[in-house]
C-alpha cells in the first residue's frame, strides 16, 4: 500500500532525453555528414527500385512484388529512426515528448515485424520457384502474393500496438535519459520504475513468434533449396539457382544476427553502447545495402535500368 502511494505521488515523466549516437563534439559533424549521405542514398536507391518495378511489365513477378514492398518498407523504416539520429548528431542530446517517443516506438516495432515477415515470404517464394517450379504459377499467384504482403503489414501493426501499449502503460518517474538515438524497447524498459516482468514477457513472446518464427520459415526454405540444388545434375544450373538466393540469404543473415541478439531475450540489456552499434546495422546499414545486394547481380533489373537510362 505504501509503495502504491509513493508511486502515485511521483511525477510521471513527460519527456525523455535521447543521448544520440555520440556525445563527442569532435566527431559529431563528421558523423552527421556520413549519416545524412547514407539516408539520402537509401531513399534514392529504394525509390529507384520501386519506380523500375512499377514501370516495367517484365518485373511484374512475385519476387519483384515482394522486393517493391521491401523497398517501400525500408524508406519508411529509415525515416522513423534516421531523423532523430541526425538531430542528435546536429544538436547533441535533445528532448523528445512522451507521446512522440511512443509514436516512434510504435512505427519502429511495426516496421521491424513487417520486415521479418516479408523476408520469410521472399524465402518461401524462392523455395517454390526452385523446389516446385511446375506449381509456381498456382502457389504464387497474385492473390497469394497480395495476401502475404497484407498479412505482413497488418500483422506488424497489431503486434506493435500490443507491445507499445504495454510499454506506454508503465510508470516512468525518472531518470529520463535514454542512451540511444531513438526510442527503443530495451532502453525504455530500463527506465521504468514499476515492475516490468509482464511487459518483458510480452516482448519476449512476441520476439519468439515474430523473429524466431519467420527465421525458421526462412531457414526451412533455404534448407529445402540447398537439398534440391545439390541434386541438380548440371553445375551451371546449380550456380544459377544459388545466385538467385545468395543475395536474400545475405540480407537475412545480417538483419537477423543483429536483431535477434537484441530482442530475443527477456532480460534487460546493460551494454547500451553495443546496443547502439547493432541498432545502426539494422536501422541504417541494412536498408541502404538491401537494394544493392538484391539488384547487383540481377540481370533483369540491370536490363530495365539500362532501358530506362537509354530512353531518357
Image (cartoon, grey):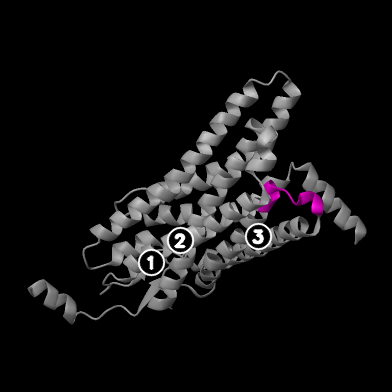
Q: Which residue is mark 2?
A: 109
Residue 304 spot, x, y in % from top left: 83, 51
Q: Residue at x 58, y 65 (%)?
A: 76
What kind of secondary structure does the magenta stretch mostly adopt? helix
Is tag 1's residue or tag 2's residue first in the polypeptide sequence?
A: 2
Residue 223 spot, x, y in % from top left: 54, 30
The segment highlighted magenta reads: 57-65
* Residue nearest the observer in this picture, 37 or 293: 293
61 falls in the magenta region: yes
Numbered label attached to residue 42: 3
> How far apart are the two marked residues, 3 and 1, measured between alpha carbons?
27 Å
Q: Residue at x 52, y 69 (%)?
A: 89
* For residue 75, above or below residue 204: below
Task: Answer whether labels 1 and 2 touch (C-beta < 8 Å).
Answer: yes
Describe the element under mark 2 as helix, strand or loop: helix
Describe the element under mark 1 as helix, strand or loop: helix
Numbered label attached to residue 164: 1
Amino acid at each position: 500500500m505504501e509503495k502504491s502511494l509513493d508511486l502515485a505521488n511521483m511525477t510521471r515523466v513527460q519527456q525523455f532525453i535521447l543521448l544520440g549516437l555520440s556525445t563527442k563534439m569532435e566527431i559529431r559533424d563528421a558523423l552527421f555528414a556520413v549519416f545524412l549521405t547514407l539516408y539520402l542514398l537509401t531513399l534514392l536507391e529504394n525509390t529507384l527500385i520501386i519506380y523500375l518495378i512499377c514501370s516495367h511489365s517484365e518485373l511484374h513477378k512475385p519476387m519483384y512484388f515482394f522486393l517493391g514492398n521491401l523497398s517501400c518498407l525500408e524508406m519508411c523504416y529509415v525515416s522513423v529512426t534516421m531523423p532523430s539520429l541526425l538531430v542528435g548528431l546536429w544538436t547533441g542530446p535533445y528532448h523528445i515528448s512522451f507521446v512522440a517517443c511512443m509514436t516512434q516506438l510504435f512505427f519502429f516495432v511495426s516496421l521491424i515485424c513487417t520486415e521479418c515477415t516479408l523476408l520469410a515470404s521472399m524465402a518461401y517464394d524462392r523455395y517454390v520457384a526452385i523446389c516446385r517450379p511446375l506449381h509456381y504459377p498456382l502457389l504464387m499467384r497474385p492473390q497469394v502474393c497480395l495476401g502475404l504482403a497484407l498479412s505482413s503489414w497488418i500483422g506488424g501493426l497489431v503486434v506493435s500496438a500490443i507491445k507499445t501499449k504495454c510499454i506506454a502503460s508503465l510508470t516512468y518517474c525518472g531518470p529520463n535519459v535514454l542512451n540511444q538515438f531513438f526510442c527503443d524497447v530495451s532502453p525504455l524498459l530500463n527506465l521504468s520504475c514499476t515492475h516490468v516482468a509482464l511487459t518483458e514477457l510480452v516482448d519476449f513472446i512476441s520476439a519468439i513468434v515474430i523473429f524466431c518464427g519467420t527465421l525458421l520459415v526462412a531457414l526451412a526454405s533455404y534448407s529445402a533449396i540447398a537439398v534440391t540444388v545439390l541434386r541438380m545434375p548440371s553445375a551451371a544450373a546449380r550456380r544459377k539457382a544459388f545466385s538467385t538466393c545468395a543475395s536474400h540469404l545475405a540480407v537475412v543473415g545480417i538483419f537477423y544476427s543483429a536483431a535477434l541478439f537484441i530482442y530475443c531475450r527477456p532480460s534487460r540489456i546493460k551494454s547500451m553502447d553495443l546496443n547502439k552499434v547493432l541498432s545502426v546495422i539494422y536501422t541504417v546499414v541494412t536498408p541502404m545495402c538491401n537494394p544493392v545486394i538484391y539488384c547487383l547481380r540481377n540481370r533483369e533489373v540491370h536490363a530495365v535500368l539500362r532501358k530506362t537510362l537509354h530512353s531518357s
